[in-house]
Amino acid sequence: MDRFLCYVQSMGNPKGVRRNFEKLEERRLLASGLLRQGVPQAEVARQVGVHRQSVSRWAQQLAAGGQKALKKAGRAGRKPRLSTADLRSIERGLQRGPEALGYETSLWTAWRVAHLIEEECGVRYDPSQAWRILRKLGWSCQRPVGRALERDEAKIRKWKKKRWVEIKKKPKKKGEPSSSPTKVD
């Protein structure tokens, strides 16, 4: 069991932990210095704390492109499809409301947000992914209150005080006979 945990921990970063590209570059450059001194790849891997396959790949890159080939790799993962200007444009569109896109209600749905992104930025997102953009912009899922515009709070309070008191059920008085079939007389 301990070996399994060690294996899982050595397989990249835990979820939510960002890679430190500067530290990774330091490791590659340290390995390149050791490789230039003639240290075997297996020993370099042990000293640097990486797999031998990584050292082998670095040695190939070093031979092909020199030390410059081992410089900082840059960002990880796919490049974002939306720029910061696009995100600002989407934010402005969200603030204008769905009515500006021709919808009848002021409720943003995932489909409507995906439509907004496509209209504003020309980038098509599946509605199931549009919520990620909303979260990135600091928007949260909200449900409309659902109260009528004609609602009269004063009349509602009056009804609760007078009429509701008259019609609501009252608890039975103690000592009355029970109709429960499980109770013994």
Image (cartoon, rainbow, N blue to C red):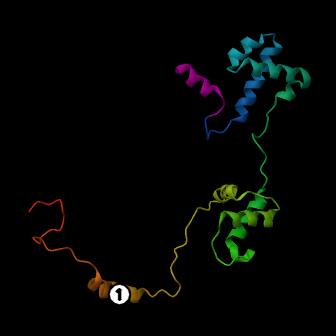
- Residue 177 lies, with reference to residue 44, above or below; the image says below
The residue at 86%/28% (across/down) is 69
- Residue that appears at 35% across and 87% down: 159
Front in this rendered view, residue 68 or 41: 41
Left or right of 181 on screen, residue 12: right
Q: Is residue 48 left or right of residue 170?
A: right
Q: Range of the magenta residues? A: 1-13
Quadrant assignment, res 28: top right
| Magenta-drawn stretch contains 6 | yes
Near-viewer residue (136 or 159): 159
Most foreground residue, 130 or 52? 130
Question: Residue 116: where, in percent of width, then height?
Answer: 74, 66
Is 4 contained in the magenta span? yes
Are there few (<14), some (14-19), or many (20+) residues within 10 Å of tag 1? few
Where does residue 183 sit, x and y in percent of width and height? 14, 60
Q: Residue at x 69, y 73 (%)?
A: 98
Q: Position of residue 61 (x, y in %)?
A: 86, 24
> On the image, which quarter does residue 170 sit in?
bottom left
User: Does residue 39 sit above or below 162 in this rendering?
Assistant: above
Residue at the (80%, 15%) spot, across then down: 35
Is residue 5 or residue 109 the one in the foreground? 109
In this rendering, would 147 be left or right of 131?
left
Which residue type carries mark 1? Trp
When the figure is inspected, residue 43 is found, relative to residue 121, above or below; the finding is above
User: Callout 1: helix, strand or loop?
Assistant: helix
- Pointer 1 residue: 159
